[in-house]
Image (cartoon, helix red, strand yellow):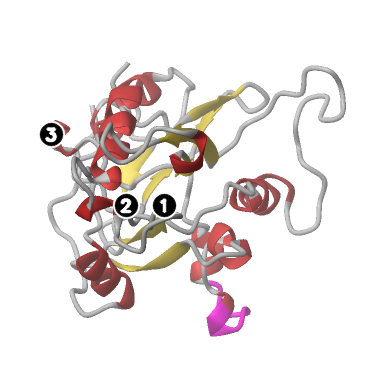
Amino acid sequence: MTTVSRTTTGRKLGLVIDLDTCVGCHACAVACKEWNDGGHMAPLTDEDPYGKEPFGVWFNRVHAFETRPKSGCGAGPATTRTVHFPRSCLHCEQPDCVTVCPTGASYKRAQDGIVLIDEDKCIGCKLCSWACPYGAREYDSHSGTMKKCTLCVDRIYNTNLPPAERQPACVMVCPTSARHFGDLGDADSDVSRLVADRGGVDLLPDLGYRPVNKYLPPRERRAAADTAPLDDAPGGADIGQRLLGWVDRLLSR
């Protein structure tokens, strides 16, 4: 088994994803695959990508579902809302995917907290995918190894790129700026302030994995016939908390 280093620099590089502004365009998922699998401007490296049953590894996936206020806030189609939920590795502070690895292929970097896989050591046993409650790891049948989000570690430290472009590919392409990258170990960083201002939350916090990545819950929408926020209406409820509860139930199956 593999141990997680207790000696760190305090840096926690990660993502903050705004569920209020994500439109589910999947640009993040495609850009991630392009950069990590095919290289810049290369074709997607799927098996039979243009056939009837394309198959391949995706480091980032986007789910979509509808939510509506509880009774008392209206129940018609006009009050429903589609929420898009991007999902990838959360680079947990207590990653069981690392501790179950029998070869040391999975590891968490002490200098920035990024969880990575050494493909030279990975034997494709899939134990890490069983240990991850977020479904963030996938098996690559071509290489016989596990794959996951790397936070584009080859981009964020690439001094050949302009400083503004030293961000994960998914962040660079997001058309609504729903994805933010930075040091969540620094309380004064832009991402940490965003989490504090918007009430950013962990996924499945009861499990104790302490994910570095945070989600910003959707903000309440004003009813079409009323200028008051939905949470001020009789029987109003917090859509953001219901959303996170739905996600917790989905990932716990």
Q: What residue type is labelled 2?
A: Pro
Residues at badges 2 and 1 in contact (C-beta under 8 Å)? Answer: yes
Q: From what the image shows, is residue 184 above or below residue 244? A: below
Answer left or right for 30 relative to 172. right
Is residue 24 visible in the rendered image? The answer is yes
Q: Is residue 28 left or right of residue 90?
A: right
What amino acid is labelled 1 in the image? Answer: Leu
Give the number of the disc on residue 206.
Answer: 3
Q: Nearer the viewer, residue 169 or 17?
A: 17
Q: What secondary structure is found at the residue carrying circle 1?
A: loop
Q: Give the range drawn in magenta.
A: 158-164
Q: Mark 2 points at which residue?
A: 217
Helix, strand or loop under label 2? loop
Q: Position of residue 201 (x, y in %)?
A: 23, 51
Q: In this view, does 136 lie to the left or right of 13?
A: right
Disc 1: which residue = 19
Residue 139: % across, % down: 54, 24
